């Protein structure tokens, strides 16, 4: 087997997403053959080299790939561990023996679709802006934004961390003087939908992610999860630019 980048081997072994694996390497938490490695370009032989992450030796054979779709309720953090002791999305996964981790995040007060997997290659591709995998949200915002504000949001806004990419925005309903919007974005920036809505003067009251690429909420109640079908995995890989 040819030499591969260390972070790619770690991600494939189910440690975390490739981006998080890079952070672990840079933090000095990874050893190769007993030596701490901090250089991201390091190449390893996944069949011969011994790789340790925080003291845990990775198996040399790739794990079985697991793909889980979870309906995250509000009041859960999208992390594997939480120093504050808050409920975690991992607490909702009962009977899953293989280690999986969330792809992207939904904040504590948000709800909806969340993908968890140990397929580091797919996780990296889904969160990379180059592949532009769409994510759709139902968003209840305070007040009723006019057509001009919705058009500005759709065309792109200039936020503190740079301009947003064009989005799909439409008014789908009204509730007690507030607007229910459907917003589709292709970016993975932190709390982006909330920041976009606040920028036009209509802060988010409630946010639910209802679609990730080809995956939808159909038949999935809050707090419940299911495994993806082979066809869904194929469609998701295709959406992420990985082919079939």
Image (spheres, grey):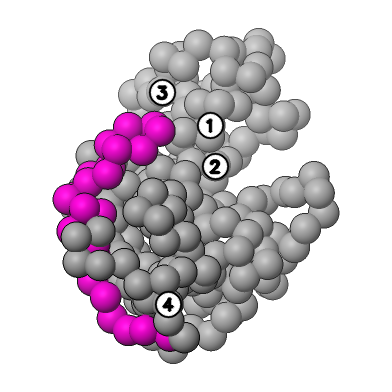
Position of residue 236 in the picture relative to residue 107 (left or right): left
Q: Residues within 10 Å of mark 4 (few under 14, many from 20)?
A: some
Magenta-colored stretch includes residue 164:
yes
Residue at left offset 43%, top offset 53%: 198
Position of residue 96 in the picture relative to residue 85 (left or right): left
Residue at left offset 66%, top offset 11%: 35
Counting from the top left corner in percent of width and height, residue 138 is at 38, 73
- The residue that disc 4 covers is 178
- The residue that disc 2 covers is 16
- First reached walking from the N terminus: tag 2 or tag 3: 3
Residue 84 visible here: yes
Q: CA distance from mark 4 to mark 3?
A: 50 Å
Region in magenta: 150-175
Q: CA distance from mark 1 to mark 3?
A: 11 Å
Contact flag, marks 4 and 2 (Cβ < 8 Å)? no
Magenta-colored stretch includes residue 221:
no
Which mark is drawn over residue 21? 1
Q: CA distance from mark 4 to mark 2?
A: 39 Å
Q: Nearer the viewer, residue 122 or 179?
A: 179
Q: Residues within 10 Å of mark 2 (few under 14, many from 20)?
A: many
């Amino acid at each position: 087997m040819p030499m591969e980048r260390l972070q790619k081997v770690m991600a494939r072994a189910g440690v975390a997403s490739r981006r998080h694996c890079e952070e672990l390497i840079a933090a000095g938490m990874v050893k190769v053959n007993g030596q701490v490695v901090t250089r991201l370009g390091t190449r390893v032989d996944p069949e011969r080299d011994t790789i340790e992450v925080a003291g845990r030796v990775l198996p040399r054979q790739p794990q079985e790939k697991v793909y889980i779709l979870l309906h995250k309720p509000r009041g859960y953090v999208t992390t594997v561990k939480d120093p504050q002791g808050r409920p975690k999305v991992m607490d909702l996964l009962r009977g899953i023996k293989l280690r999986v981790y969330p792809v992207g995040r939904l904040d504590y007060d948000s709800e909806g679709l969340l993908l968890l997997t140990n397929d580091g290659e797919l996780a990296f591709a889904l969160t990379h802006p180059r592949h532009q995998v769409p994510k759709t949200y139902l968003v209840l915002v305070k007040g009723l934004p006019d057509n001009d504000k919705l058009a500005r949001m759709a065309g792109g806004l200039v936020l503190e961390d740079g301009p947003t990419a064009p989005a799909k925005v439409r008014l789908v309903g009204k509730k007690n003087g507030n607007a229910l919007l459907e917003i589709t974005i292709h970016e993975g920036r932190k709390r982006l939908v909330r920041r976009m809505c606040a920028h036009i003067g209509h802060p988010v009251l409630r946010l639910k992610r209802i679609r990730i690429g080809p995956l939808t909420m159909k038949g999935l109640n809050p707090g419940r999860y299911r495994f993806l079908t082979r066809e869904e995995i194929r469609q998701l890989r295709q959406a992420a630019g990985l082919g079939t």
